[in-house]
Image (cartoon, helix red, strand yellow):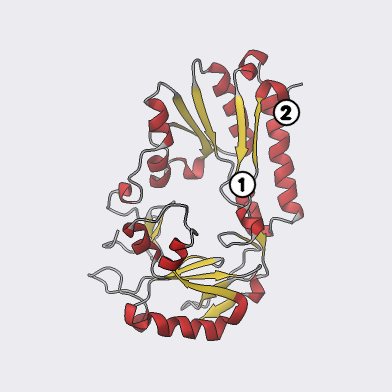
Amino acid sequence: MKNVGVINALKFERAHSKEKNKTLEVDPGNLFRGKTIANTLKNTGIDCFTHMNITNAGNACSKLIFEGSTIIPSLKPSDLIVNLRKNIEKTSGNAYFFVHLDSLDTISHEYGPQSHEYQAELSTITYLIQKELIEKVNSETAKETLILITSDHGAVDVNPEETIYIKLDLKNTLNLEVEDTKKPVSPIGSPRDIFLHIKKEKLNWTKEILKQKIGEKAEIIDTEEADKKGLFGLKESSQEFLERTGNLLIIPKEKQTVWFETKNKSRISFLGQHGGLNSEEMLVPFAIAKLIDLKK
């Protein structure tokens, strides 16, 4: 994606662009070239279905990572769970149903994972699973169904007003982006994990400047070193991955947040964040059970 620059993967549009809702004229497959879970299962005769919110059901990213699965859009968690039950009951043979409930993540960002709003949303989802799936699904289907509940990440409460904002000389510090525009690659990631594409000759200088401004409130580490320490997984990352992540990583400690000054002086407002190394944002639930056992 070197000729495109930084991409908002979900919307598949150029990040920080004034042209909103303008889909890029490049192959989304450049983002992911692996074999999807659905395609792997289909090759063994297992039908795959994906239940998710309608806002993301039709975008390029969803079509890419759920290739081989029938995507079933829903308006809210309520109709999603009901549609899931109906789909499970009418589907014969081996099948895999992937369910994405994104409302809890949205609430967590807006109000924080320890908020009353978060607990209310969690209670709502729990109620829907219990009342509309477990209690109403027919017993024969329940005997043949396993339910697995997990998450892609946790979350941590933060105080946006304590965010450390860094001002960099972007033009002279960051690597150039696409050849036709010569714009710097903007900082990417989140206030809990910031990835920078720094010019090689400016790397050590930038690290020292950041250490002076941030102090002991964050780890500042080369991405290659982070990769060797296993922060991106157990296996060594590909060169393509390292090119996309840049060469310098800022990981705020505890519940600290760090971001960069923008031209419009915009400020972080979310009370919940994830992406860092706090145990609250790294640990995720994992529960599995036979659906029939939950009906008892």
Give the image quarter of residue 214. Answer: bottom right
Q: Which tag, 2 or 1, sits closer to the chain's start?
A: 1
Element type at mark 2: helix
Q: Which residue is mark 1?
A: 103
Element type at mark 1: helix
Give the image quarter of residue 239. Answer: bottom left
- Locate residue 198 relative to residue 270 in the image: left or right: left
Q: Position of residue 161 (x, y in %)?
A: 66, 75
The residues tagged by marks 2 and 1 sit, at their Cα atoms, a distance apart of 18 Å
Packing grade of label 1 (10 A; few <14, some 14-19, many >=20) is some
Residue at 58%, 74% in the rendered image: 218
Q: Position of residue 131 (x, y in %)?
A: 72, 28
Q: Position of residue 112 (x, y in %)?
A: 68, 58
> Mark 2 touching mark 1, by CB under 8 A?
no
Q: Residue pushed farthest left?
A: 180
Q: Which residue is mark 2?
A: 131
Residue at 72%, 25% in the rendered image: 294
Most foreground residue, 250 or 6:
250
Q: Which amino acid, mark 2?
A: Lys
Above or below, 286 relative to 210: above
Give the image quarter of residue 204. Answer: bottom left
Q: Position of residue 64 (x, y in %)?
A: 38, 42
- Locate residue 165 relative to residue 295 in the image: left or right: left
Quarter of the image with the C terminus in it: top right
Above or below, 269 relative to 155: below
Q: Which amino acid, mark 1?
A: Ser
Quarter of the image with the N terminus in it: bottom left
Q: Can residue 161 be seen at all in this image of the molecule?
A: yes
